[in-house]
Amino acid sequence: MRVLVIGGGAREHALCHALSRDPQVTALHCAPGNAGIAELAETHEVDAVDGEAVAALARRLDAGLVVVGPEAPLVAGVADAVRAAGIPCFGPSADAARLEGSKAFAKEVMAAAGVPTARAYVCTTPEEAAEALDAFGPPYVVKDDGLAAGKGVVVTEDLAHAREHAAACERVVIEEYLDGPEVSLFAVTDGETVVPLQPAQDFKRAHDGDLGPNTGGMGAYSPLPWADPKLTDEVVATVVQPTIDELRRQGTPFAGLLYAGLALTSRGMRVVEFNARFGDPETQAVLARLRTPLAGLLHAAAVGALADAPPLRWSEDAAVTVVVAAQGYPERPRTGDVIEGLADVAATDAPDAYVLHAGTRREADGRVVSAGGRVLSVTATGPTLAAARERAYRAVGRVRLDGSHHRTDIAATAAEAQSAAADTVETA
Ligand code: AMP
Ligand code: GLY
């Protein structure tokens, strides 16, 4: 199978990493890619949100499968254009991708499907916003209705800040605050059959201890040793399958990756958000453990054949991903800084730990420089979360990027809980 991946972040690097190990994949292409992806796939220049351009590239490459990574091309209808060209595409139509593209639409679908989520008001004027903020009280949750790369959400105790963010958005969703740990569950679907991946946890805030502004995600790990083993089945039954069924009923079937962002609150599980694509950085941790060849799975989803797909196989290992971000991320990331130490990681830490590039570019002189806010992520596997963490941070320590920052507490609490549970078993 000849595969073309659209996108150029660490998620797409992780997808290419997994696809490159699938014996069914005879040629791997990526557009636009990045400096790391270029070592695994042939990269191509393309305007990723231009459906006709992507379809033309896929035709020229004789692709048998196109995998669309990021949300912007999906919302722009790139998957529709590829399918219209007769090429199997993993990724929902523009209509179905509104589940991520509009928070208000997602709320409507959840209401129709009976899916538990935070109570919310959609507001278009400062007066409406003020009323909604008063109705819920602090902490305030204010979300830009449209796509904002994970940065359109403000959660704050400060009413003035909440009002300011609401005023800066054209249409805003103001909702009830959800307490409790968050879980990301990805499900591969062909619009009818749902195949869940293993759950992961993401770290959204910029700094240790969940402080600082919201980001696209600063790290992730999987599996979740603290979670109820029945969690995945419960999420499929109460969230994913009803949502997929409702979208099909509305005439906008969703084929691709449905990402359910969940809060396990004191009053039960609630959906925080849906995304219409693999999450970044959770994908790096989840795919590090998937043993089933990826191309066959995604192709089955693209052609409506998931009901016949064999059950997924997983490694027993844990995986941890740590994002290295540019100076100033998320507010004003600085780009153009040289990244050093990548060869050291490849020589010393592989295959247990490896770098997945996000915002990177190779200069004509061969140096790799930063080209985005989240510059790269390091993913490591190990028999326990503690072992995976240690390997990930050892590799992060070899990467040199002036002014960069990363969180030092990714998976720390879960690793401690896992070790404590193992100690209890040993002494019992
Ligand atoms: P979203 O883009 O909707 O995923 O929001 C980004 C992040 O903001 C989430 O991962 C949560 O950490 C936080 N958040 C969003 N909605 C809520 C809510 N209703 N209550 C508490 N935190 C929230
Ligand atoms: N990790 C959060 C996201 O992909 O939106």
Image (cartoon, grey):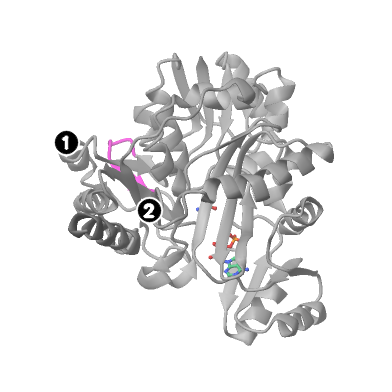
180 displayed left or right of 276: left
Q: Quadrant of ligand 1?
A: bottom right
Residue closer to the observer: 156 or 318: 318
Residue 333: image quadrant is bottom left
Going 59% across and 22% down the picture, which residue do you hit?
A: 300
Residue lying farthest front? 428
The residue that disc 2 covers is: 225
The amino acid beneath tag 2 is Pro
Q: Nearer the viewer, mark 2 or mark 1?
A: 2
Whether residue 34 is visible here, answered yes or no, is no
Measure how far apart labels 2 and 1 are at the Cα level.
31 Å
Q: Classify 10 Å Cα crowding around label 1: few (below 14), some (14-19), many (20 and above).
A: few
Q: Is residue 423 magenta?
A: no
Q: Which region shows up in magenta?
A: 363-370
The residue that disc 1 covers is: 347
Residue closer to the observer: 134 or 30: 134
The amino acid beneath tag 1 is Ala
Q: Position of residue 418 (x, y in %)?
A: 30, 57
Residue closer to the observer: 366 or 135: 135
